[in-house]
Image (cartoon, rainbow, N blue to C red):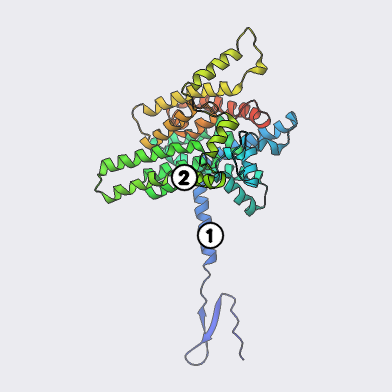
Amino acid sequence: MGTAPARGRHGLAPAPSPDGGLAVVPARPSLARPRTRLSSQRAASFVLEHRWAIGAYVASRLLLLAVALADSPLQHRPFGSELTNWDGFWYTMLASRGYPTQVLHVQTTLGFFPLYPMVMWLVSHVLFVSDAVSGLVVAGVGGLVATLLLERLATQWWGPESARRAVLLFCVFPGSVVFSLDYSEGLLIPLVAGSLLAVTSRRWLLAGLLAGCATAVGPDALAIIPAVTLAALLELRAAGWRDASARRALLAPLLAPAGIVAFGAFLWVWTGTPFATFDAQRYGWGERTDPLALVNQARTLAGEISLSHFDYHLVNLNLIAGLGGAVVLLVGIVLLFLRPRLVPPAAIAWSLGIAFLSVTSKYTPPNPRMLLTAFPVVLVLAHRARGRSFRWLAAASTVLLVVMSAITYVGIALRP
């Protein structure tokens, strides 16, 4: 038995020549190294192109990390408990224990939608980390993806200069603390932003799939259903019903409810009622729809700050944040409708849907987290503010982010 000839120093392998000797022919070059180099070049090019958005987001996360680290010894709270405060506690419990089989009139995991804890569970098993850490990974990475998608949306709407301001304000907005907590907005907002981007490029199947995933993240995601429905109807109106490509627009509104429908079907089998999550929110957290919610909250706050019996310990900071947020929400919506109206109708419809849900909610007013979810309202503030006005806006937002996050991390006085 012969042996294979050895490969030469320069990658040349000897081969038999026609006259019986050995001829040296080039060996086939390896494709692994060029492909790896090409992937690295593409990644470096992507980071360079989006360095402003990535830098702003990373800087804001480092700022909140410093706030959490400073809070921990000052308030004698473990660092890990800060990351799972408020809804984070329930999401980590849901990821590890699942749903109960019956609806109880107390607070249970049935009050929360499933997709975010499902992703938490998956990441925790892939990375071999705790559910709390996996939730933070999902929220943090999702926040970065949301920032990049919103940069693209804002560039389409107003151009690159306004997009840079919009990205910065989004990153330092007080509600962005949710990207540094175990909160589902890190999954919800990129799904919605991706759906709106897909609508802009008329990729209706993708828009519907992303919207369908979003409606499995939280009840406020239901606002994406009328948003993509409006976009589909406008497409049909412009192109006509007989246009086959225009009829594809109906894929988006047909697929958008998939998440909530699938969750309802599961709850029906698991607990006996498809409305188990809404029952849990109603009886466990006192959540109700009230057209006069803001009026009642204003009356409650006025009674708490009455000079006849004022005690700052009794003032509900959530009422202040919600009523202040209502003012910001109103200003943002007005700005969205001012001419020239450059924001697409679907994005405006999404903002109006979140606005309606928050101003009529007894438990969740238009606080900074809800304003961040209605992201066109935040982005348009940055677009309209320029020069010194924007610098003051960004500085004030950063101060509020630090102060409000410091309270949110370690206590129960202020919800995200």
Query: Could you tell me which quadrant the N terminus lies in?
Result: bottom right
Residue assigned mark 2: 261
Seen from the viewer's position, the closer of residues 262 and 9 is: 262
Query: With respect to residue 5, does 280 lie above or below?
Result: above
Q: Which amino acid, mark 1? A: Arg
Q: Is mark 1 on a helix, strand or loop?
A: helix
| x, y percent for residue 400 | 58, 26
Q: Can residue 203 be seen in this view?
A: no
Above or below for 171 versus 126: above
Q: Which amino acid does label 2 sit on?
A: Val
Image quadrant in which you'd find residue 92: top right
Give the CA distance from mark 1 to mark 2: 45 Å
Near-viewer residue (29 or 328): 328
User: In x, y percent, where is residue 256?
Assistant: 42, 44
Q: Write down the residue under mark 1.
A: 37
Q: Residue at x 62, y 46 (%)?
A: 98
**Can see residue 96?**
yes
